[in-house]
Image (cartoon, helix red, strand yellow):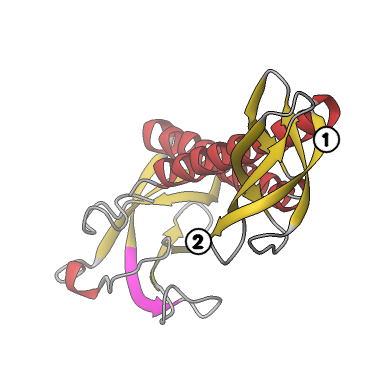
Amino acid sequence: MNKKVAVSILMLAGALFLVITLVSVSRSVSMKNNGVQTQGTVVSKSGKKGLSNVTVSFETPDRKCVTAKAAKREFVSAGDKVMIWYDPANQQKIDFGDTIGYNMRGVIAGGLFFILGFYYFIRYSITDKKDKKLISSGEKIAAEFVSVDRNERYNMGDNNPWLIKCKWTDNRNSREYYFVSKDYTVDPDPYLIGRSHIDVFIDPDDPATYLMDTSFMPKGNNTIG
């Protein structure tokens, strides 16, 4: 999967989670500020972890008995007395007032996922732009294949990812440059059979800025870069 697509999905999921929990917090705050507070009796409860759906019955000032349901954080049992807020215009809308802190954690988590996704989206967009510039205006050279090694800096799953290494000597100053590919989750060795050189796009003014053409690698893992 394209990295920008992956982080876009992460951003979308984070934004969706952020909006859902933010709406819940906003509704609870609005209900506590504008609703009518009264005491109710727990009729039933469903759910054991996180937020439970609790059904309560309560009486309005005009002696009307109302049964309504809402999410509640604190543990309660049937028959318990609880404080609630209800909407006088729609008495079926109630709130227990104890889910704001719980839902705020969702707001923070959703916000962090969105920010993280946005950061990587911008980062990959800049990288893509640089790569396209190297392909269109950089100098294409044939670098000598050196080896396939493991990246010991971190793991990809249970193993270290693979790296392709190659080298090239600049005849203008006899300086030798080494190039390293991006990380791979599959062993590149079978795809390098018969290859002694690998194309690399370099910035002629700064060969340390480069893009290794690894389009011979299987699609869906890594294509070029």
Above or below for 176 versus 201: below
Q: Earlier in the sequence, mark 1 or mark 2?
A: 1
Label 1 is placed on what type of residue?
Answer: Gln
Q: Nearer the viewer, residue 115 or 200?
A: 115
Residue nearer the viewer, 205 or 93: 93
Most foreground residue, 80 or 28: 80
- Mark 1 sits on what residue? 37
The residue most toward the front is 63
Give the numbered dot on residue 130: none
Q: In this rendering, would 184 be left or right of 19?
A: left
Label 1 residue SS: strand
The residue that mark 2 highlights is: 174
Q: Which residues are magenta?
A: 144-150
Left or right: residue 79 versus residue 31 is left
Look at the image and say whether residue 146 sits in the magenta stretch: yes
Q: Is 53 part of what is drawn in magenta?
A: no
As displayed, is residue 181 above or below residue 203?
below
Which residue shows up at 41% across the image and 61% down it? Answer: 181
Q: Position of residue 15 (x, y in %)?
A: 57, 37
Q: Are marks 1 and 2 in contact (CB under 8 Å)?
A: no
Question: Could you say where residue 138 lies in the image, as x and y percent from the top left?
Answer: 43, 37
Residue 142 placement (x, y as % from top left): 31, 55
Q: Secondary structure at mark 2?
A: loop
